[in-house]
Amino acid sequence: MIRTVPTQPFDGQKPGTSGLRKKVPVFQQPHYVENFVQSIFDTLEGFAGKTLVVGGDGRFYNREVVQKILKMAAAAGFGRIKVGQGGLMSTPAVSAVIRKYGAFGGIVLSASHNPGGPEGDFGIKYNIGNGGPAPEKITDAIFARTKSISEFKIADVPDIDIDQLGETKIGDTVVEVVDPVADYAELMGKLFDFDAIRDLFKSGFTMRFDAMSAITGPYARRILEDQLGAAAGTVVNSTPLPDFGGHHPDPNPVNAKDLYDLMMGPNAPDFGAASDGDGDRNLIIGRGIFVTPSDSLAILAAHAHLAPGYAKGISGIARSMPTSLAADQVAKAMGVGIYETPTGWKFFGNLLDADRVTICGEESAGTGSNHVREKDGLWAVLLWLTLLAKRRQPTLDIVREHWAKYGRNYYSRHDYEAVPTEAANAVMEAVRSQITSLPGKSFGALKVKSADDFAYHDPVDGSDSKNQGLRVLFENGSRIVYRLSGTGTEGATLRVYLERYEADPAHHGIETQAALADVIAVARQLSGIAEKTGMAEPSVVT
Ligand code: VG1
Ligand code: CO
């Protein structure tokens, strides 16, 4: 019943910041998926008879790939496969299910914040037994295997019914179709005081959650509306669609414009939130205020103890290098450790496993904790609701008070998308070539303190990751970071991260781009980005 199929390697099956991401037509080539999945299995050892968790964000091609994985995992010798009903499961839920059942690992089908549909993007990511993304050691080995693969194994059986809950078998392997929400919702109920949040909604507190036609719809409906008593209709765009209804499921004020406009307008509810394609990111907008993800991380870390799951306090905070230093202020005040890692959640896993940190976050709207090993969109929303339930103040006041206490880190990211690879490399090279000569130089009032090409030494396993972004740090605490995205599928995406620290509350009311004007001007001048890319302005400013 197991068929061995000869195959030939494909170029470029290299996992990026978060798994292998390509256009759907690339994934649709015969054997493309099979080669990558077999390369994952060939790289792993000791999974015979063990459990694999499988789920995706419901984007176009999700169902077809789920069928291939079920048949290949059975052929590879897994004992049990837990697959979300309809092939659906959010990224944080996959992580939760892996951990709860002690699974060997999991496969997440998603290109996360990238658009979906027949011409959109698809992705495959492998997660290890701690529930987190495979570390570089494993993703490098998978990539190496894709270059030499010559056959794959697949069970020759008809498609499995993934819409009915329950168990079926492929040979000796049990395929269990599970409710994708249940285990996750149970975990949230343990971490948070649902009664307190229910009281908040009972008091007339209003909210909108925009699921962007992606995976969090069913999760948000069940938890916010059914369990916590938020009004029906609180969750909008709540049905996962293969093309996300044409939405770009990247939850920032630009892509979630409807939500943003509502929250800034006269009829704004008390609180607004959104998540991304696979449910691991969060956008937080209070009435009249967009909370930057970096500020959100700092505010959540400062308030985590209000939730029962963190009542004992936090052991430390980790943030990705481009994320603002707002969390550092909180860590310092709390007397806990702060860690700066490269971009991507896989770098947080070791720190969480070793309990060096409890809370982690990224400037790209990812926040999470030691409850799973992925960032977690709804978790962040529930922690915000916890602090709103306890403090009973508008979000705007909470954020302003936070700035008054810790200072404000003005922050913005400028993305230059679909740039020709050579032009993007030229920009990076232009900055890199100045790195050693920049310290001591002044640009107006900004004097460079130090500059480097960020490298990370993992304090837990001792591994090193180099070339993780170019940093220019100024004496007044301002920063510029240049980085190439590792999740795009078209040309290159250049990210320029800009930050300025302002301690004085009298200066906390400036519009962000205006507050950063000096830093932005230096970032453009240093890199020659406009000339090299032919783009006078970035594609997206968040
Ligand atoms: C982006 C974000 C990064 C995030 C990654 C995966 O990566 O910047 O912070 O971890 O996406 O998120 P890059 O390499 O494009 O900058 V998700 O929610 O798209 O899996
Ligand atoms: Co995501």
Image (cartoon, rainbow, N blue to C red):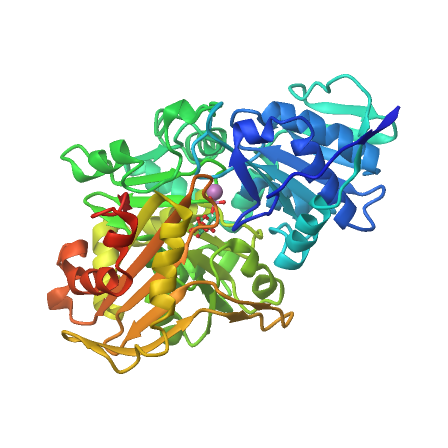
Q: Residue at x 34, y 58 (%)?
A: 427
In the image, residue 402 lies at what x, y percent?
Answer: 26, 63
For this orientation, the residue located farthest to the left is 506
Residue farthest to the bottom, as pictured: 440
- Measuring from the top left, give residue 138's x and y in whole percent: 68, 54
410 vs 542: above or below: below
Q: In this image, 3 relative to 456: left or right?
A: right
Residue 465, quarter of the rendered image: bottom right
Q: Nearer the viewer, residue 18 or 216?
A: 18
Q: Residue at x 43, y 45 (%)?
A: 281
Horizontal relation, residue 94 to residue 245: left or right: right
Residue 42 locus on image (x, y percent): 78, 45
The residue lying at 56 percent from left, 31 percent from top is 26
Task: Please state the total of marks drawn on the protein image.
Answer: 0
Q: Is residue 316 visible from the viewing direction of this image? A: yes
Q: In the image, 299: left or right of 223? A: left
> Relative to 5, does residue 498 appear above or below in the rendering?
below
Which quarter of the rendered picture does the N terminus lie within?
top right
Residue drawn at (38%, 39%), measured in percent from left and top?
250
Can residue 58 be seen in the rendering of this structure? no
Considering depth in this image, is 463 or 86 the residue closer to the camera?
463
Location of residue 287 in the rendering, given as x and y in whole percent from the top left corner: 21, 43
